[in-house]
Amino acid sequence: MADHRSAADEALAAVDKLLADRPKRVGHDFSEATKRLTAYRQALLASWGGPPSEPMDRKRLSRLNAVISVVYGTHYPIGSPEWEPLRGARDELARLVDSSSR
């Protein structure tokens, strides 16, 4: 449990850094956030012993995959990065982390 909680905290911190810095070009911050999010996903899968069988865990995985997709999409925008979808993804990640720690 502690392993995926620490990965979750690192992922949330990386997304918070993106929102605080708002880099104008793709770069290290986006890559770092994506790495942290996928590490969190791997830690969750490990805590479940593989792909989730419980409906609630499948929903958590789906929500996390959606957050990863938004970060990835913001990383490679057509034009300037759109920050509002990333803010929404960050809030969803925070809710997910909170629900996973109960």
Image (tube, rainbow, N blue to C red):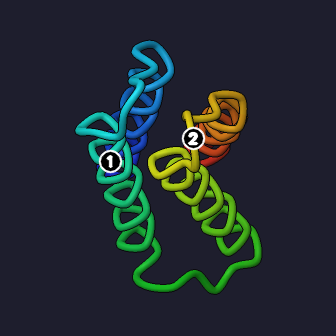
The residue singled out by tag 1 in the image is: 36
Determine whether the residue tagged by mark 1 lies in a helix, strand or loop. helix
Type of the residue with mark 2: Gly
Determine whether the residue tagged by mark 2 lies in a helix, strand or loop. loop
Name the quarter where the C terminus is drawn. top right
Q: Residue furthest left?
A: 28
Q: CA distance from mark 2 to mark 1?
A: 25 Å
Mark 1 crowd level (few <14, some 14–19, many ≥20, 10 Å Cα): many
User: Residue 13: where, in percent of width, then height?
Assistant: 39, 26
Q: Is residue 49 left or right of residue 65?
A: left
Q: Residue 22 versus residue 60: which sits nearer the camera?
A: 22
Q: Is residue 25 left or right of residue 83?
A: left
Q: Residue at x 67, y 68 (%)?
A: 62
Q: Residue at x 45, y 47 (%)?
A: 75
Q: Residue 79 versus residue 51: which sits nearer the camera?
A: 79
Q: Is residue 60 above or below residue 45?
A: above
User: Residue 80: where, in percent of width, then height?
Assistant: 55, 34
User: Residue 95: where, in percent of width, then height?
Assistant: 69, 37
Mark 2 crowd level (few <14, some 14–19, many ≥20, 10 Å Cα): few
Quadrant position of residue 82: top right
Q: Earlier in the sequence, mark 2 or mark 1?
A: 1
Q: Residue furthest top?
A: 20
The residue singled out by tag 2 in the image is: 79
Q: Residue at x 29, y 53 (%)?
A: 35
Q: Residue 21 versus residue 3: which sits nearer the camera?
A: 21
Q: How many marks?
A: 2
